[in-house]
Image: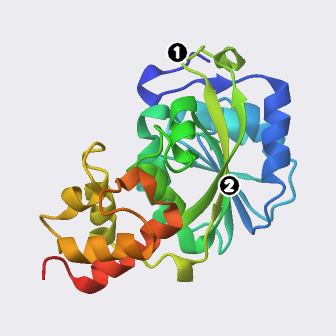
Amino acid sequence: MKAKKRFGQNFLINPHWLKSIAEAVSGFDGDALVEIGGGTGNLTRELAGLSFPRFVVIEIDRELIPVLRDISPGIEVVQGNILDIPLDFGKKQVIAGNLPYYITKPILNHLIRYRESIAGGIVMVQKEVGLALTAPVHSENYNAYSVFLRLFAHVEKLWTVKRGDFRPVPNVDSALLKITMRPVSETLFSGKEADILFRAFRERRKTLVNNLKKEYNKEVVIEFLQSLGKSPDARAQELTVEEFSRLLGCLNKEGGNL
């Protein structure tokens, strides 16, 4: 089956990684396993042997649906774009899949939207994206989305997977991530708070105070930084995820410019 560029199809073919991914997925406890992008079924065949009560495979390519349905009668195959499909297949879903690079962040946002019923999962992303999503504070790759995702989930890089393990061969290597959702009680964030976060990183060379001063009281931000033992000239990339969580709560409570 020829891969279709418009769907971002690069099929993982290395048996070692297929088995390793299935083993990592088996470490999650859940009532439904959801594979994003079954493709030609290479990973699907490994996942089908796991002991989840329900196994759902989502695939956008109509031509691949019969291939996936032939793997096992116990697999539920749903045709469509993952971004248009409600993730309501269980009360405690586990996610697996090689995410198309061009819509990685929209897919992760989709998972966050349904986080109340998602335990976590194992996903493949572009290596550079994986580096950003797991980047430590102060590092060059640490950015607004690094913090945003980790406000909702614990993210761990498991392995780097070389481009030669895929067909067709992509232009970049990949990273396999383990994502474990935080309890919803820890992640009561709204669109407004997300906006604060992305404004904070708007210009990396500017201080946090300068990036936020048009919308939020400068003195409130300075006071918060001092409470952390940080300089008023600190930049966004100097704050940990936990410190950002506190900052977002503080600024949301203050309600912007006073």
Q: Quadrant of the C terminus?
A: bottom left
Residues at discs 2 and 1 in contact (Cβ within 8 Å): no
**In the rendering, at what x and y percent does residue 249 appear?**
38, 79
Which disc is residue 121 wearing?
Answer: 2
Q: Nearer the viewer, residue 11 or 68?
A: 11
Q: Residues within 10 Å of mark 1 (few under 14, many from 20)?
A: few
Q: Residues within 10 Å of mark 2 (few under 14, many from 20)?
A: many
Would you name the residue on which mark 1 appears?
A: 171
Task: Say what secondary structure mark 2 lies in.
Answer: strand
Q: Quadrant of residue 154?
A: bottom right
Q: Amino acid at mark 1?
A: Asn
Q: Amino acid at mark 2?
A: Gly
Question: Is 39 located above or below residue 54 in the figure?
Answer: above
Q: Is residue 193 visible?
A: yes
Question: Is 257 located above or below residue 26 in the figure?
Answer: below
Q: Earlier in the sequence, mark 2 or mark 1?
A: 2
